[in-house]
Image: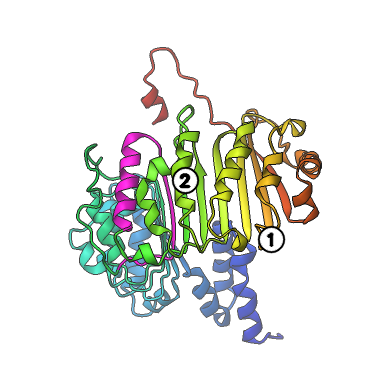
Amino acid sequence: MPTFPLELTDEIIAWIPFVCYGELLVATQTLLSCCLVCSAWLPASRHHLFREIHIDRSARYDLLVSRVLHSEKMRINLLSVRTVTIMHPRSPALNCRPFVLEFAGHLPNVTLMHLLYGGVEVFLSHPRSFVAISRFSSIQKLMINTDEFPSFGALRRTLTLLPSLADLTLWRPSWPDPPADLSPHLSHGASIVPRPALLSVNVRWGTDAPDRRRAQQFIAWLSETATSSSLLDLQATIDSTPGHQIGCMATFGLSLFRFGRVLRRLEIGVGESRDLPELERFLCTLTSLTYLSLSFDSAIQPETWVQMERLVRSLPCPTQLAVLIISVCYDGPPEPLKLEGLEALDVALPPELFKGLQSVMLHVHYLKEQAGPEEGPALTEPILTVIKNKLPKLHDRDIIAVFVDGINPPPVLDVEPGTDANAALS
């Protein structure tokens, strides 16, 4: 039977996760099949099987501990792990597993830790977890999605104890509601400390009062750490509720001003008009900015384009801006001929002022009807035609692009009269 060189089969096996990107189950099943082909395929197949570990139930955790961690033969495969995802789907049994204590020192090459929907409860389940967190010294990126910390101090300690942490994503984390009268001591006595010294921060919170207090508490503390002088990439977005278009400056607070020293990339949401003066002041501090993304969370209005002109003109070094992304929303499919006020964008970006501008992207999002067809691609060309007429200078520079996509509206719950709404959602 002819055989292929191991270098060739190893390369083919290495491509499986990329070919099956987004289909974790398919990739896992394919790699498991490769493990069974022959002994020569086993090392490469196991290496890629162990690159990502997903812990979402107690049985899977227990198998990982008993058959891998406690096995002299299999433990070596933990050296291949690069990503760990811990998800706690309301399983009380999983909450008792001391992950940090058991795996400290055994995952020396993990660079990404993803905690979601209760994963923090597992990660910090043991009282002595904080003692061992620093042994996860290779973690460079931490992603926490819709999770609850026992206290704000627990979040602070987690971030300061990870020595290599450079990239942080926090999407609506929570902890006990800070008191309404915290200001101006939201940082809880934080002083300039060497960690974390983050390069990239992606934060997202809601706009209700408790979420805003948490957001401001976190940003105030982070601004007192080394991150204030190291941050290059900031994404600050909000989950606004209908009728409450509160902007990012009102949500995250004035501590954002402390991150303007070396910031090169900014993605931020724009709320109601009264939020604009503070946002303009913030943009005035960004002397190193090359990438700017502005998201208008409220429905598009003619004055939106005038607001855009005010914001981009507030940049202190407009000549170095290379990429500008504008995201706008419509209640329904946009009518290309009704892009009132769009001409202000051409006035806002004169070539003599924005010499380095290489790309202007207009992202148009709209709410489509429930189960309605996707009309976005069909709307792109008509909008480009309008842009050609209303933005002749930008169009002639051949730097403008348009993307249109429809967003499904939130599902409508059929709740019988007298039924508790919270019960229906649970």
Q: Is residue 205 magenta?
A: yes
Q: Position of residue 409 (x, y in %)?
A: 57, 31
Magenta segment boundaries in residue numbering: 195-223
Q: Secondary structure at mark 2?
A: helix
The amino acid marked with disc number 1 is Gln
Judge from the rendering whether residue 188 lies leftward or rightward of residue 85; answer left or right: left
Residues marked 2 and 1 touching at CB (< 8 Å):
no
Q: Is residue 211 left or right of residue 34?
A: left
Mark 1 sits on what residue?
Answer: 358
Position of residue 233 measured from the top left corner of the image (x, y, whole percent): 48, 61
Question: Which residue is more in the foreground, 192 or 238?
Answer: 192
Element under disc 1:
loop
* Res 275 seen here: yes
Q: Residue furthest top?
A: 417
Residue situated in front as seen by the camera: 229 or 43:
229
Report the residue at 22% width, 54% height from top: 153
Residue at x 30%, y 67% (from the top left corner): 195
Gap in angstroms between the C-alphas marked 2 and 1:
24 Å
Image point (67%, 53%), residue name? 360
Which percent across, then down, holds residue 31?
Answer: 56, 68
Query: Which quadrant of the structure image shows residue 131?
Result: bottom left
Residue count near mark 1 (Cα–Cα under 10 Å), binned few <14, some 14–19, many ≥20: some
- 247 vs 364, left or right, is left
Circle 2 residue: 279
Q: Considering only vertical position in the picture, is 231 above or below 189? A: below
Which amino acid lies under the numbered mark 2 shown in the image of this protein? Leu
Q: Is residue 178 magenta?
A: no
Residue 94 appears in the picture as rendered: no
In the picture, which quadrant includes the C terminus? top left
Q: Sequence-wise, which precedes: disc 2 or disc 1?
A: 2
**Does residue 18 sit above or below 37 in this rendering?**
above
